[in-house]
Every structure is written in C-alpha cells, then in structure tokens.
Amino acid sequence: MNNEYFEIDYPSSRQLTFDVGKIGLGKHHVKALLEVDVSEPWRILIENRKVGKKISFITWLIKLIADCVSSHPPVAGINEVKKNKVLVFKDVDVSIVIEKEVNGIKVPLPYVIRRADKKTYEEIQKEIETAKQQKVENETDYVLGQKSSLSLMKVYTSLPQWLRLVLMRILVLNHPKRTKQNMGSVMITTVGMVGHTHGWIIPYSMHPVCLALGSINEQPVIKKGEIKKAHILHLAILVDHDVIDGIPAAVFVDDLVRKMEKGMGLESYVE
C-alpha cells in the first residue's frame, strides 16, 4: 500500500467512454441552457401516484422528447457525409445511460429504447426496469439489451484509442443506419439530477440531439403578476449544427419547452 496514493482498476467499458468524449468534442453542437417550469407535470404525476399510477417523471420526459423529435424529424437526422446528405429517420430511438456494476465498480452503460415515439409510458418504463435488472457478466453486455461477440469486444477495447476511433468511423459513424442501430438518434442523460446541487450539466455526445437533465429546484417565479413557487428543471440541450440550421432547431426547442411546461401527454392520466 502506497502512503501517497492508491490505484483504481476500471473495467474495459471505460475505453468506450473515452471514445465518446473524443468524438463528441469534434461535433458542432450548439448548446442551450434552459430553466423549464415543470410544476404542472410534477403535480399531475404526484397526484396520480396516490391512485396507483406510477409513471415516473423520467419515463414521461423520454416519451415527450421522443414525440417532439418525431414532430421535428430533421433535428435528429444523421449526416451521410460522402453523399452530402442528412438521413432523416421516421422513428426515434432514444439512448439512455443506466448505472451498472462491472467487476465491482459502478459504471454507466448505454441502453437504446427503440421506436420510443411509438411506445406507451408503461412500455418504456417496463423496458427501463428490465434493463436495470440485467446482469453484466462480461464485455458482451456493455450495451444493455444487445449481445456482441465477446472476443471481438475484448480485442476492440484492448486497441489504442486512435485505432478504435478509426474503426468506429469506418464501420459505424460513416453509415447513418448503423449509427442509429448502434447508438440511437437521441441521447438523454439524467446524471445531473443526482444530488442536491443546483444547475446544469453539459455533456459530450455523438448524437445529433442530446438532452441533459439537471437539478429540479423549487424557485420563486412571477406568474400573472404574483410571486409563486415553481419546480424548475435545469435543462441543457445540444443540437448538431451540421445536421440542422439554427431557426428550425430553435423552433424544436421552443415546442419542446412549451409541451414540457404544459405536461403534454399526461391529460389521459389526470383523475
């Protein structure tokens, strides 16, 4: 035991985290830091928990975001650089991160909710719970819900980063359909909701659209000339400027915030 420091062995899945950060730095993401009043959906969800309807805030947001992206499909398009085009998909695959234990260490692993815009709240919530319960036995489980070759994954994670990035671009990122199949078209991270710190978290992402949910805090706001308490969600949104121009991206963000503040989609859950 060294008296000056100690070492932590991390699993090979951390190599994938390094790669996402490296590629994400090269994306031309426009970033927006927003404060969204989610008092209404917060109220509806709490009221419905009292009568046994246990749809979570995160489940509702995943569905709402997927539906909103579906209404503005170019925002989640994926560049097809060689053809000088953007491939726009007709359904929305949402990538989330679930913390799992790998070799005794807790690490974030990706899970893709396929066709999230076509699914119900109940289907999405059940899918997330199933992914949380999945056991991670080895490298084949590094993308939850999908199996890969153990030998290939071991070889891949043992390669130097420059070679991993070359292979990722050649085999995946240069092919929009493979990109969507492997990582989805929209990324949502909830890491900023952990703890009691007020504020935003700004992630790196390879996705054309990435939303980072920060803290939800009770704050005073002015409504109709009166000061009232409101639940304010700190939301960071990254949009790839190579995929979509500023005005349609701003229209998407405005529509999303408006629907969030109204609690859109929860009408049928109101008792």
Image: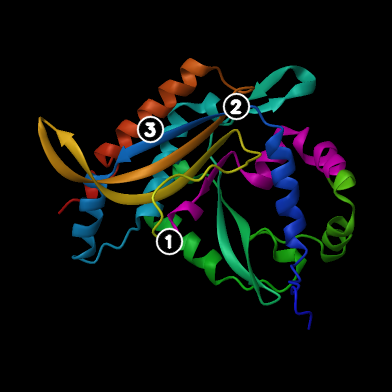
The residue that disc 2 covers is: 88
Q: Give residue 42's position: percent from left, percent from top.
A: 26, 51
| Residue ranking furthest to the bottom | 1
Q: Residue at x 48, y 23 (%)?
A: 249
The residue that disc 1 covers is: 195
Mark 2 or 3, nearer chain start: 2
Q: Nearer the viewer, residue 195 or 76?
A: 195
Residue 258 in sight from this viewpoint: yes
Q: For mark 2, give the secondary structure.
A: loop
> Which three-letter amino acid code belongs to the residue tagged 3?
Leu
> Which three-letter amino acid code belongs to the residue tagged 1?
Gly
Q: How many C-alpha atoms fall within 10 Å of the one at disc 3: few (<14), some, or many (≥20)?
A: some
- Nearest to viewer (mark 1 / mark 3): 1
Above or below residue 164? Residue 237 is above
> Which three-letter amino acid code belongs to the residue tagged 2?
Val
Q: Give residue 68's position: percent from left, percent from top.
A: 42, 33
Q: Give residue 210's position: percent from left, percent from top.
A: 54, 39
Taking the image as shown, residue 224 lies to the left or right of residue 203, namely left
- Nearest to viewer (mark 2 / mark 3): 3
Taking the image as shown, residue 54 lies to the left or right of residue 271, namely right
Q: Which mark is residue 256?
A: 3
Q: For mark 1, give the secondary structure.
A: loop
Name the quadrant containing residue 241: top right
Q: Which segment is the magenta one? A: 165-194
